[in-house]
Image (spheres, rainbow, N blue to C red):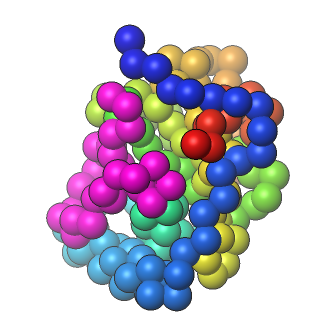
Amino acid sequence: MHQLQTEAEEGIVIQLEPDEVLICEVLGRMRSLNARAANVRDVKVGKQDGAIADVMGIKAEYAFAKAFNTFPDLGLTPRSGSADGTLKGYAYDIKSTTYKNGRLICTKKINADVEMYVLAVVTEPNQIDFKGYMLKDDLIKDSNLMNLGHGEGYCVEQNALTKFKNN
């Protein structure tokens, strides 16, 4: 089994440089356009605009790769599902929100390619705070089902997440 180092401290905060923000904004909007043109169903949980959610998502993915010295998936190919990357053998999916007290939320559509879900709080325009993670088997449970007004999905509070060790 893979091992992730953790500690009970605050999340890992990453500041993106202005040029990194620009790259993420362009890639996020291009991903959104490509996905909508290919009729990929937008399964976001919330009322935010899909293009804005895609930009926020790529910022979080890019910042996570920066934090853990991996390479982000910069591809523009339309996709539904799949992982955002791999960290220490775990395929991960980054879930982003702008709410500082935001929860880790995912839809009821089970992503077979993912083993770990990561919560990122994105503060515009350039700060991303990784609050922690939860393994798929711990998140995808009936006890975590909740309806926050946009349909039922899996949801946990930040205090239920395992913190990343900042090393």
Quadrant including the N terminus: top left
For residue 158, which quarter of the picture?
top right
**Above-or-below relation of 110 to 71:** above
107 drawn magenta: no
**Quadrant of image for the C terminus:** top right
Examine the rendering and report whether any part of residue 153 can be seen. no
- What residue span does the magenta drawing correspond to? 64-89
In percent of width and height, residue 135 lies at 52, 25
The secondary structure that most of the magenta stretch takes on is loop
Residue 133 pos. (x, y %)? 59, 35
Residue 76 lies in the magenta-colored region: yes
Q: Position of residue 141 (x, y in %)?
A: 59, 18
Name above or below for residue 87 compared with residue 39. Answer: above
Residue 159 visible somewhere in the drawing = yes
Q: Nearer the viewer, residue 165 or 75?
A: 165
Q: Is residue 13 left or right of residue 24?
A: right
